[in-house]
Image (tube, rainbow, N blue to C red):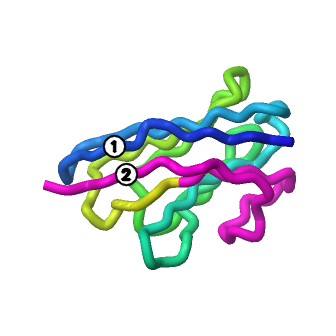
Amino acid sequence: QVQLVESGGGVVQPGNSLRLSCIVSGRPASKYTMAWFRQDPGKDREFVVGINWIGDSTYYTDSVKGRFTISRDNAKNTLYLQMNNLKPEDTADYYCAASPRLRIGNTQSAYDYWGQGTQVTVSL
């Protein structure tokens, strides 16, 4: 069984940055394609970005391209999301997800394991 634990959320002003982390335990992170999703209350959970198991292929949703960067350190079993130039519309609960499949999926059904989420609020 794989466990995912996110951290790094908080309250920031527009234009500022946050770095989220997701620690993988139970099995080596290197065996999984990983992704970040986010969900605003009352809305569907949406895909943000995914990364393959090696870390040399990524897939971003258009709204975060150029502002967010996903990375992974398999030696530390940790996934990261660097979020720069944050906007109020980035406010959401952010979830880490893992999939044993090679393809980077952009739907919830593509991922088997989920963290509990970390809250990000962007507000003046």
Q: Residue at x 21, y 49 (%)?
A: 15
Q: Residues within 10 Å of mark 1 (few under 14, many from 20)?
A: some
Q: Residue at x 47, y 78 (%)?
A: 43
Q: Which residue is mark 2?
A: 120
Up the image or down, 72 lies above or below 58; here it is above
Marks 2 & 1, CB-CB < 8 Å contact: yes
Q: Classify residue 35 as left or right of residue 113.
A: left
Please count the marks in the image: 2
Quadrant position of residue 78? top right
Q: Which residue is mark 1?
A: 10
Up the image or down, 103 lies above or below 109; here it is above
Q: Residue at x 39, y 46 (%)?
A: 83
**Residue closest to the far left:** 124
Query: Label 1's element?
Result: strand
Up the image or down, 77 lies above or below 124; here it is above
Residue 98, magenta (yes or no): yes
Q: For the residue marked with disc 2, what is the amino acid?
A: Val
Quadrant position of residue 9? top left
**Front residue (pair 8, 34):** 8
Q: Residue 49: give x, y in percent of width and height.
A: 57, 57
Residue 27, magenta (yes or no): no
Q: Quadrant of the N terminus?
A: top right
Magenta highlight range: 95-124
Q: Residue 97: give x, y in percent of width and height.
A: 68, 52
Q: Quadrant of the C terminus?
A: bottom left
Q: Residue at x 54, y 44 (%)?
A: 70
Query: Label 2's element?
Result: strand
Q: For the residue marked with disc 1, what is the amino acid?
A: Gly
**Front residue (pair 71, 79):** 79
